[in-house]
């Protein structure tokens, strides 16, 4: 027979969280990335090494990452107009400028949501809301991202419709989206694309596949949150309605 002490009964009655969810709520990383962090070591619960599958009581347990005690901060949501030449990362092993170098005065630990290539500018969400980060980057939630791309050559309406309907790339077919021709020049075309997939370099590969390589690419919005009014390198706090929209799009409630 297993005897449960009064202290254990009290602890069992408390609400516990999976350790990776707690790390996400502390703004360390998304839940998926938190699992990797736990597996790599460095996370301790009450002084003992943590393992995948552990649960914690946020009000009673002491959780540390590389010796630093973690706590759940007030949620912060920012939108950054990422400049070209900046790495979408918290740290960079080659001492290149990262998106966090563009942020000053943020009151909490924040991480970028998803990625933009170094040569791509535009809308990037940063937050310490680990659950929202996880869902915005998970393919099943299909959050729209809107891009403006200058591509080589004069794109025909027929080619734009082909991109809209989906084309086959080396890693499979693309999902249907929205493509419109904004402006045509002598040897280039400005197009707007709305997609919800997050595959690596997808817009560039799509355009190259139909004979119109991308010369310049900017993401103007994600989930309806726009960078209008922000110059490259500038950021702002997201409005409450913008946060509510993103959370609703990913099945979360305020």
Image (cartoon, grey):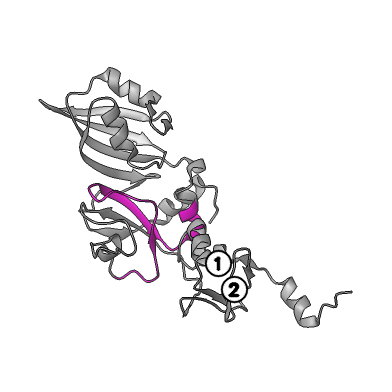
Residue projecting furthest to the right:
1
Bin the neighbour count of mark 2 within 10 Å (Cα to Cα): few under 14, some 14-19, many 20 and up: some
Spot occupied by residue 166 in the image (x, y as percentages of width and height): 39, 26
Q: Is residue 25 above or below residue 169?
A: below
246 or 152: nearer the eye? Answer: 152
Spot occupied by residue 100 in the image (x, y as percentages of width and height): 30, 64
Spot occupied by residue 142 in the image (x, y as percentages of width and height): 47, 40
The residue at the point 23 percent across, 62 percent down is: 97
1 and 2 marks in contact (CB < 8 Å): yes
Q: Is residue 247 above or below residue 72?
A: above
Q: Which residues are magenta?
A: 105-134
244 or 137: nearer the eye? Answer: 137
Residue projecting furthest to the top:
158
The residue at the point 39 percent across, 41 percent down is: 199
The residue at the point 49 percent across, 45 percent down is: 249
Q: Quadrant of residue 13?
A: bottom right
Q: Which mark is residue 58?
A: 2
Which image quarter holds the N terminus?
bottom right
Whether residue 227 is visible: no
Q: Which mark is residue 22?
A: 1
Q: Which mark is residue 92?
A: none
Whether residue 82 is visible: yes
37 or 238: nearer the eye? Answer: 37
The residue at the point 59 percent across, 80 percent down is: 46
Of mark 1 and mark 2, the one earlier in the sequence is: 1
Left or right placement of residue 196 versus residue 103 in this view = right
In terms of secondary structure, where does tag 2 sit? Answer: loop
Bin the neighbour count of mark 1 within 10 Å (Cα to Cα): few under 14, some 14-19, many 20 and up: many
Residue projecting furthest to the left:
186
Spot occupied by residue 167 in the image (x, y as percentages of width and height): 38, 25
Q: Quadrant of residue 201?
A: top left
């Amino acid at each position: 027979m297993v005897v449960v002490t009064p202290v254990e009964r009290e602890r069992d009655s408390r609400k516990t969280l999976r350790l990776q969810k707690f790390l996400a709520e502390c703004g360390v990383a998304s839940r998926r990335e938190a699992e990797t962090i736990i597996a790599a070591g460095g996370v301790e619960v009450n002084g003992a090494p943590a393992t995948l599958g552990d649960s914690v009581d946020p009000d009673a347990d002491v959780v540390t990452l590389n010796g630093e005690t973690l706590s759940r901060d007030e949620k912060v949501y920012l939108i950054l107009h990422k400049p070209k030449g900046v790495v979408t990362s918290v740290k960079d092993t080659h001492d290149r400028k990262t998106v966090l170098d563009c942020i000053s005065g943020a009151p909490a630990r924040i991480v970028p949501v998803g990625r933009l290539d170094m040569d791509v500018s535009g809308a990037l969400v940063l937050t310490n809301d680990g659950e929202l980060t996880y869902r915005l980057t998970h393919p099943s939630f299909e959050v729209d991202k809107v891009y403006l791309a200058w591509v080589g050559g004069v794109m025909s309406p027929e080619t734009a419709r082909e991109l809209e309907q989906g084309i086959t790339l080396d890693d499979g077919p693309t999902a249907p989206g929205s493509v419109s021709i904004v402006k045509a020049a002598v040897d280039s075309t400005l197009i707007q694309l709305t997609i919800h997939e997050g595959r690596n370099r997808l817009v560039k590969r799509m355009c190259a596949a139909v004979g119109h390589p991308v010369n310049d690419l900017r993401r103007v919005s994600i989930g309806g949150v726009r960078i209008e009014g922000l110059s490259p390198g500038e950021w702002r706090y997201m409005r409450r309605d913008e946060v509510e929209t993103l959370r609703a799009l990913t099945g979360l409630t305020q």
